[in-house]
Amino acid sequence: MHDLMHDLAVLVAKSESLMVKSDTKEVPPRICHVSVDLPSLNDRPWEIPAPLLGAIGIRTFFLPAQPLHFHVSYAVELENSLYAKIVSTFKRLRVLDLHTLRIETVPSCISKLTHLRYVDLSGNYGIETLPNSITELLNLQTLKLSNCGLKRLPREIRKLVSLRHLEIDGCHGLSDMPSGLGELTCLRALQEFKVGPSNRLSELKDLNNLWEKLSIVLPWRLPLLGRPRLKEAEEANLKEKQHLQSLIFDFGNSIDDDDGELESVLEALRPHTNLKKLEIKRYRGVRLPTWMSFLLNLVQISLENCNGCKHLPKLEQLPCLKSLSLDHLESVEYIDDNSCGGVNDESSSSSPSSSTEPTTTTATFFPSLENLYIMEMPKLKEWWRSKLGEDEEQSTANNQEERQLLSHPSFPCLVESDICFCPQLTSMPLQPTVVKLNFRQVSGRVVQEQLLTMAKETPTTVATSSSSLVPLSNLEQLDTWEIEDLVTLPEEAFRLLTSLLKLKIYSCPKLTSLSGGMRHLTTLVSLEIKSCKELDLSDGGMHFQGLRNLTSLRIVDIPKLVSLPAGLQHVTTLQSLYIDGCKNLESLPEWIGNLTSLQKLGICVCPSLKSLEISGVIGIRGEIMGGGNRRDDGSLVINNNNVFSALESLRKKKKTGKSKNNSSSNAQVLQGETCPISDPDGK
């Protein structure tokens, strides 16, 4: 807020609003709204200032939140008796904010505040129960109990007929909710509804004014309760709750003997078509509900820990879907196992060749999807179930699969893609528009497929939201982690990466070469290579000279690194160089002095490295090491100015005959075992 606006607000409100401090001497008679400043009182309990006790017309009372730990210096001790005094003194209160004050007991006399509209008790982990008298607050509209230690709600909560907002998210000890919630027909916000022995799904039947978000937790087992869950699900009447924007189904740690009935229950919990966000967690059924394919306003879908699920509904035609997250679906083998890749099954099935080369309209394939996250799906093989002929020769199978891939639709506007921990995954739809691409523990074939297949095609072959877009030309970050069978990166694909800024290659044990494509990465700013046991950077090292915008280079645990890539001497933009765990690195080249932009140099655990020499005679030893900045942990960051000023000093000494060519000096040299030098970027 601008200072002038603040001053105006204070001027207008000063007759009704007041910030009370410990030294407040006078309280205006018309004061209605009070907030309290609680300075540190050296462990003395805070008390209500005497002038405030006479302001019986106060309608709003705020106490500032306290730190969760008592040892924090600005914590103020507030006794439980204080809250009872507040309640008994200010009987005209409309708003009472006591959130995060370490309250353990709510005084039963709170029922005397008959005018209360708003009560905030959130963040008080010590509150396990509420007094039943709180249900006598017939004018109460908002009750905030988030992140409390509640174990149960008042039995007579149905009496709060004016209640519109009931917030109980984060109350993990609350395993059950009282019956009668369904009578609170004014409710607009009920963030969480837990089904248990005391209540039923049917309580939701008449709560058609619910807005925003609703989380339904169903951690119960049918045989123990002996009541028909399917009927209850139908009576919940979710399809009439047109104002709900976000819906979460959490099946908890339930163990169900009848997965078929569980599927029927979820099918009966069909929401209104206005829904925008859907999450399903810990679902044990084999199939997900069919209604997911017809929620045309969905923007976000998240499926998490649905380990029993084997079949997913068709989602590719949802016109508004922007985010799709599939996490820990351990039984799914194909994202779409109903066809071989076509969106329009009816049209493709009419053609004799449709089983091998489907022709589809890509406009309906995830037309708005921007973010794709696929995590921990160990059985996932491909996006589409393949239907190759049994008599086809193996020699032509790969070509046919490539033709299939190109005939499949691609993501037309995908921005971010994370595909992780899917070791059997061998094929994915193409992602020509992606900006950030992350592969981890997938088949190297997927990486090759995404990069190489699009590199062979013209912009018009791969459908995107922009017909003139060159595939992969938007890619800014590429991460490859733990790709066990990746041998090389395709040079052809690197030609397309005209916007790449960051490249990470971690733990690819069979990777032998980065290929000559490195010279095409002229926009690359950051390069990180780690734990690639067979990678030889000296092979084609001159390709590094094309990295004319590189500013940061990290090389970690590369056993075959004997010397830095020769082409690196031409990368004069390099500002940070970090080398760690390269046990066979013997020396740093003379030309490292030509890296005039270098500001940070870190070397750690390189036992074979003896010294750094310039022109073969001048060694960087004690003088330069002393010129660096040593951290408390013993690590050292060498600053560019210190390094080159020291070099200049050594050169002058040599010219005047004061410098001795003694590379075996006992001064410390750049080796990690005796002088650990950590990552200059703090990584």
Image (cartoon, rainbow, N blue to C red):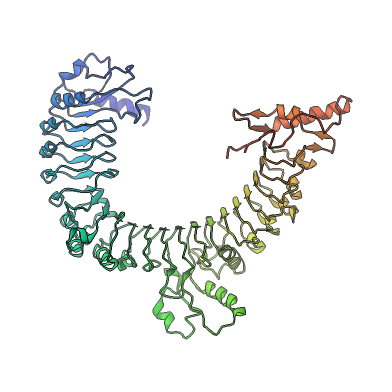
Can you give x and y, in whole percent of width and height, for residue 381 in the image?
49, 68
The percent position of residue 622, horizontal first and vertical second, equals 75, 28
| Image vertical order of residue 483 relative to residue 583, above or below | below
Tell me residue 14's x, y (percent): 24, 23
Left or right for 246, reference 373: left
Quick check: 679 above or below 650? below
**Quadrant of res 327:** bottom left
Seen in the image, is 479 located left or right of residue 330?
right
Q: Is residue 407 above or below residue 598?
A: below
Outermost right residue? 657
The percent coordinates of residue 522 (x first, y second) are: 66, 52
Number of callouts: 0
Q: Is residue 19 left or right of residue 427?
A: left
Q: Quadrant of the C terminus?
A: top right
Q: Which sits in the foreground, 513 or 492? A: 513
> Quadrant of the image for the N terminus?
top left
